[in-house]
């Protein structure tokens, strides 16, 4: 973090942290001085680099991960009268994006304490004749059971949208998350593995979906201001009723630098998570989901533990905060929020029991050994 942020932070160990250095500052300054700030050549370069990173033919940069989800759902045809199956143990952006297409979220359960991803059996049970798509989250960057989800989607003619907000660089049997479904959605919010303040990306191998997303992203217009500035176009038509979900050049400049750091950052996160696992899993009733598995590469976006049953999480968080250790909860289930309480209810027993026990510990690539040790000591003393 920068010195200013360090002075302001009350945390000895914050939940997440970013590195600020001259390479990032220079990239932004150079873009600033270029005089072109709205979507243009740097965004195009970031898209090319991200597409190559994922092994996807199309990558479309957008303003944030929520916009990515909204565009992906619209592109696969979600609208009024449709249902989209989604895990309730997820960030609320997923449900909000669904309802803003006019469709209804159908909340689904997760596998269990070892794997906080969608349970394919419950997905199958949630499908109705109105289901249009599955919105599958790779929780904490651990790929969900895509083979099973694909089989369900194919048998009912459903699209799969991946919420890969946690998963840039994750893979399943050598295939990158974001390319496992029909459309993959990424977030580059400041606490993500590829941080740029705000930003997102939509990835697909389908030419027609990519074209729809490109149009929806910029008002449904057939050309960009940048195209007209370069003399590549002089006018435009509007072929559908779209949005302004564009990414800007300054953030793309940050994104290009951060993309170059992503693999190493993911690796460093993985080492810290394994240190947590060795010290905490099975100790004092604590468990840690997502045991490493052959064929699965996680991005280790979050370090999540499950507290012993019956342990008051608030007390643990307070005790850790007193030691200067910041924690969080990923996530309060969406179906329990006021805005979603009226939604028709499915029974979600696994989500409801596990959501009371999840606790997210600090995790960022440049955490010091002393910070990791302080968290471990703090957790063991607080449960
Ligand atoms: C799982 C998940 N989905 C979607 C989003 C939305 O992304 P953004 O904050 O970039 O809109 C986030 C990030 O906050 C997220 O964690």
Image: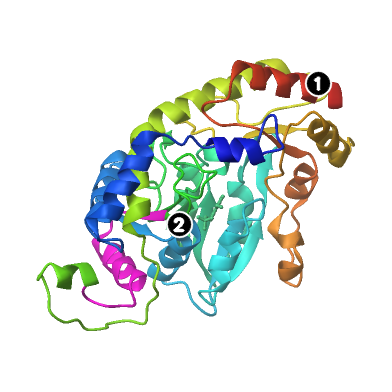
Compared with residue 21, is residue 28 higher up or lower down, i.e. above or below? Answer: below
Q: Nearer the viewer, residue 231 or 177?
A: 231
Residue 115 point in image, percent of width and height: 63, 36
Choose the circle earlier in sequence order: 1 or 2: 2
**Residue 225 as seen in the image, left or right of residue 366:** left
Q: Is residue 231 magenta?
A: no
Q: Position of residue 95 (x, y in %)?
A: 60, 64
Q: Pick the residue in front: 307 or 378.
A: 378
Q: Are marks 1 and 2 in contact (CB under 8 Å)?
A: no
Question: In this image, 27 relative to 115: left or right?
Answer: left
- The C terminus: image quadrant: top right
Write down the quadrant of residue 39 in the picture.
bottom left
Residue in the picture at 46% in, 36% down: 20
The residue tagged 1 is 380
Question: Tag 2, which secondary structure?
Answer: strand
**Element under disc 1:** helix
Instruction: Look at the image and name its color scheme.
Output: rainbow
Find disc 2 in the rendering and name its residue. 161
Inter-mark Cα distance, 1 to 2: 39 Å
Q: Which residues are magenta?
A: 200-223
Q: Residue at x 37, y 41 (%)?
A: 25
Q: Quadrant of residue 172?
A: top left
Residue placed at 16% from the left, 73% from the top? 228
Answer few, some or many: residues within 10 Å of disc 1's Cα (few below 14, many 20 plus, some between 14 and 19): some
Q: Is residue 316 above or below residue 336?
A: above
């Amino acid at each position: 973090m920068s010195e200013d942020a360090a002075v302001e932070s009350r945390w000895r160990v914050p939940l997440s942290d970013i590195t600020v250095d001259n390479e990032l500052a220079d990239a932004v300054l150079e873009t600033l001085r270029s005089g072109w700030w709205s979507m243009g050549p740097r965004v195009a370069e970031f898209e090319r680099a991200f597409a190559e990173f994922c092994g996807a033919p199309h990558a479309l940069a957008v303003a944030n991960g929520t916009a990515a989800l909204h565009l992906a759902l619209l592109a696969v045809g979600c609208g009024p009268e449709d249902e989209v199956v989604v895990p309730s143990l997820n960030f609320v952006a997923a449900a909000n994006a669904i309802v803003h297409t006019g469709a209804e979220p159908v909340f689904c359960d997760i596998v269990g304490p070892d794997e906080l991803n969608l349970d394919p059996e419950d997905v199958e049970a949630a499908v109705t004749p109105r289901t249009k798509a599955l919105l599958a989250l790779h929780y904490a960057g651990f790929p969900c059971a895509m083979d099973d989800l694909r089989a369900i989607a194919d048998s009912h003619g459903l699209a799969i949208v991946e919420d890969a907000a946690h998963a840039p660089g994750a893979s399943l049997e050598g295939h990158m998350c974001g390319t496992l479904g029909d459309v993959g959605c990424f977030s580059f919010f400041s606490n993500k593995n590829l941080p740029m303040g705000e930003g997102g990306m939509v990835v697909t191998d389908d030419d027609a979906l990519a074209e729809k997303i490109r149009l929806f992203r910029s008002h449904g217009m057939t050309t960009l201001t940048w195209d007209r500035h370069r003399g590549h176009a002089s006018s435009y038509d509007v072929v559908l009723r779209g949005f302004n979900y564009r990414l800007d050049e300054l953030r793309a400049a940050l994104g290009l630098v951060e993309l170059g750091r992503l693999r190493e950052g993911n690796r460093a996160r993985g080492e810290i998570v394994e240190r947590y696992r060795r010290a905490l899993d099975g100790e004092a009733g604590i468990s840690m989901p997502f045991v490493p598995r052959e064929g699965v590469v996680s991005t280790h976006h979050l370090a999540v533990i499950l507290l012993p049953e019956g342990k008051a999480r608030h007390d643990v968080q307070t005790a850790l905060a007193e030691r200067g250790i910041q924690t969080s909860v990923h996530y309060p289930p969406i179906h329990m929020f006021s805005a979603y309480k009226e939604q028709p209810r499915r029974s979600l027993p696994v989500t409801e029991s596990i959501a009371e026990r999840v606790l997210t510990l600090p995790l960022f690539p440049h955490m010091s050994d002393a910070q990791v040790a302080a968290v471990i000591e703090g957790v063991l003393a607080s449960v």
